[in-house]
Every structure is written in C-alpha cells, then in structure tokens.
Image (cartoon, rainbow, N blue to C red):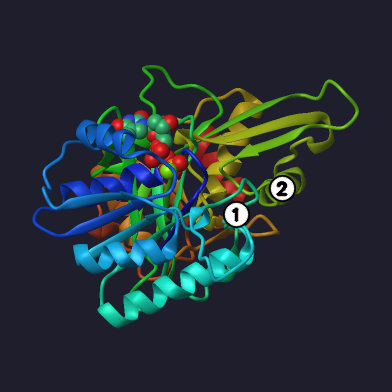
Amino acid sequence: ILFGGEPGIGKSTLLLQMAVEEEKINVLYVSGEESEQQIKMRAERIGLTNQQCYILTETNIQNIFTQAETTQPELLIIDSIQTLYSSQIESSPGSISQVRECTAQLLRYAKQTGVPVFLIGHITKEGSLAGPKVLEHMVDAVLQFEGDRNHVYRLLRSIKNRFGSTNELGIYEMLGTGLRQVENPSEILITNTDSSLSGISIAATLEGMRPMLVEVQALVSTAAYGTPQRSSTGFDSKRLNMLLAVMEKRCGFKLGAKDVFLNIAGGIKVDDPAIDLAVVAAVLSSNADLAIEKNIALSAEVGLSGEVRPVNRVEQRIYEAEKLGFDKIIISKYNKGIDQKNFKIELVQCGKIDEVVRALFA
Ligand code: TYD
Ligand code: MG
C-alpha cells in the first residue's frame, strides 16, 4: 500500500498511530527520516498501547530484510520509500531507479510472506509522487493523505485499490495528541455565525460514499485593474470561470468588471459537481450583498446553458441536510424519483439558475 502526501501533512503520525494503537500485533516501523528517540517521543504523545511495535532506523533495504527475518512482523511500515537504497544499485536514495528497485523488493517480500507493507511516499506540491508515479502501478493500493497544512482537517482518499472500493474516505483532525477520526464531517465544515453574511452558501456534497455539507465562501468586488482577478481555493478554477460565464449570460453578472475570490471552508478540496450551484449562489450573494438564509442547502450541477442538473445519490445528500437541521434544500427538478413525502426538509426543485436566484433572494 503506497501512502502518499505532501511533507508535513501527517503521514508518519497516522501510520505510527496505526502501529502503536493496534494491540498485540507485531509491527516493524522502519524510519529513514527520524531517530528512535524522536519516534518514541511521538509515540508517547499519541499514546502507546502496543508493546510489540518495533522501531528500526535504517535505510539499507538488505538490512531491513535481515531485521524483518528476526522480528517476523505482521505489519511492515516504511517511512519513507524515498530514503531507502539497495546496494545493488549505484544511484542515490530517492532516485527513480532506487525507489523502483526498493519497491520491487518490498513487493516481493509482501507477496512471499503475506505481510502487509505500507510505503510512505512524499508528494511534491505539483502532486506527483516524488520518485514517482512509476510506483502507482506496481502496488496493490494507493492512498493519498491530503488537506491544507494550515488547517487541522485531513482527508484520506483511496486512489487505487486492487481488492476493494476506492469510494471510501477518511476524515481526520490533527490534534496535539495525533490524528482523531472525525465522525460527523459536516459539523466541522460549516462555521456557525450568529448573523447571516453575504457570500456564504452551503453545499450538500458527497466525498466518496460520505455525504458532507461544506461551506462555500465567495467575495466579489469591483476590479481595481484592467484584468479582473480570479482566485479559487479548494475548487477548480477553470470550472469557476465557466460558472462565472454562465452567470454573466443568465443572471446579468458583470464578469469583466469584478474580482472573484472563492474558498471552500476547512481547507478541503471538492471535486463533486454537486457543489456548482452553491458556488453560483455564493458568488451572486456576495455580488448583490444579500445573505442567503442559513437554513438553506444546495446540491446540483450547473450546465453551460444555466440549467440545474441532477446529481447522483441525491437522497443521501438530502437526508444529510435534514439531519443537520436545514429547513430547505435546492436541487434539480430533473432528479428522478424524488418525492417530498419522504422528507421533512422542504425540497425546492429548480430547472434553471434564474429560478434558484428567485428562490434565494426574492
Ligand atoms: P508528520 O506526521 O511528521 O508529517 P509527514 O510525515 O507527512 O511529513 O506530521 C507533521 C505535523 O503534524 C507537524 O507539523 C506537527 C503535527 N502534529 C500535531 O499537530 N500533533 C501531533 O500529535 C503530531 C504527532 C504531529
Ligand atoms: Mg514523515
């Protein structure tokens, strides 16, 4: 299992946590990055319960196998694949040929012994696994740990899984005592302000299988210079430009004269198309300086001609909004088989974005 993520995101913390919280299994945690003392300190911070977790600071792969021979681990963790080297190869640790060779040897070890092996791999800002993508097709599963280092929330995504679903998602919060699983993601992603503010909307999205309500924040201001600025955090900026063009055509939004800043609260990235309508609503709300009532959630894709399009598993999204106490949810009228009778929350079903505008700001 390749476990990727940017430096500092919490890869070592999560896997060490797995190693020390798991009781009564023999774990060998190999680190080429930190000293035994540092790892012990961290383990104590997290809370050490597994007395059979062995730490090895080593970067030579042959020595690691020799140790594994004596320890006979039931789980092997390598932190990180980029620090390992095999003396059979000339090049330095972290180079493509070393990373590939060490992975191949660990793969053989995993298949021969049946011991699950976790490989931590650093990903660069550009998103490629340094030393690199070539590993992804070798391993059985690729997990990616992401989130904004300046925020406390982290998402664990499954990118590839030979023997199971990639639709699972883990959400964690970084605390002083390690990572804690977030049971109810929606609550943390929505800020609770007393008064309604303009430029804020709530989207009912799905991350993998999990419904999740996220807050979209927009700021629209008059462009000070010739070229209006566009900035988007947590949402695809090309998609934002597309939605702005649709708003210009359908809602009279003056695209060329406005700066638009968009942000998904909590530092998470959303690529679920169902967030489109909330993005449109937040931008229009900020533009007109009219707040959207706090009891309304939105969940629909927006098409090029301004049509409000249906999204998958809309019931799940509706139930999540209902569960969190929203009174209304705006969805597409083209979702099939949706009946108001099955929900306590009021369904507002729209076909075009101008209908949504009327429902929100009338
Ligand atoms: P780390 O696991 O070292 O990241 P990676 O292995 O992906 O490079 O974690 C890095 C950050 O996590 C570090 O900046 C400190 C923070 N952290 C906490 O906030 N609480 C904790 O209990 C631990 C162990 C780390
Ligand atoms: Mg680390």
First in residue order: circle 1 vs circle 2: 2
**Closest to the observer: 15 or 89?**
89
Whether residue 162 is visible to the viewer of this picture, yes or no, is: no
- Residue behind label 2 places its C-beta within 8 angstroms of ligand 1: no
Which residue is painted at 39% across and 79% down in the image?
A: 108
Whether residue 264 is visible to the viewer of this picture, yes or no, is: yes
Q: Secondary structure at mark 2?
A: helix
**Residue 70, position as x, y percentages in the image:** 21, 65
Amino acid marked by disc 2 = Arg
**Closest to the observer: 163 or 336?**
163
Q: Secondary structure at mark 1?
A: loop
Looking at the picture, does residue 31 appear above or below residue 230?
below
Q: Is residue 273 left or right of residue 348?
A: right
Which residue is painted at 26% across and 44% down in the image?
A: 181
Q: Pointer 2: what residue?
A: 250
Where on the picture, by quarter, is residue 251? top right
Q: Quadrant of the C terminus?
A: top right
**Residue 57, position as x, y percentages in the image:** 36, 48
Q: Is disc 2 surrounded by few (<14), some (14 to 19) or many (20+) residues within 10 Å?
A: some
**Closest to the observer: 258 or 270?**
270
Most extreme residue toward the top is 194
**Residue 36, position as x, y percentages in the image:** 31, 39
Q: Which labelled disc corresponds to residue 352?
A: 1
Which residue is painted at 24% across and 59% down in the image?
A: 342
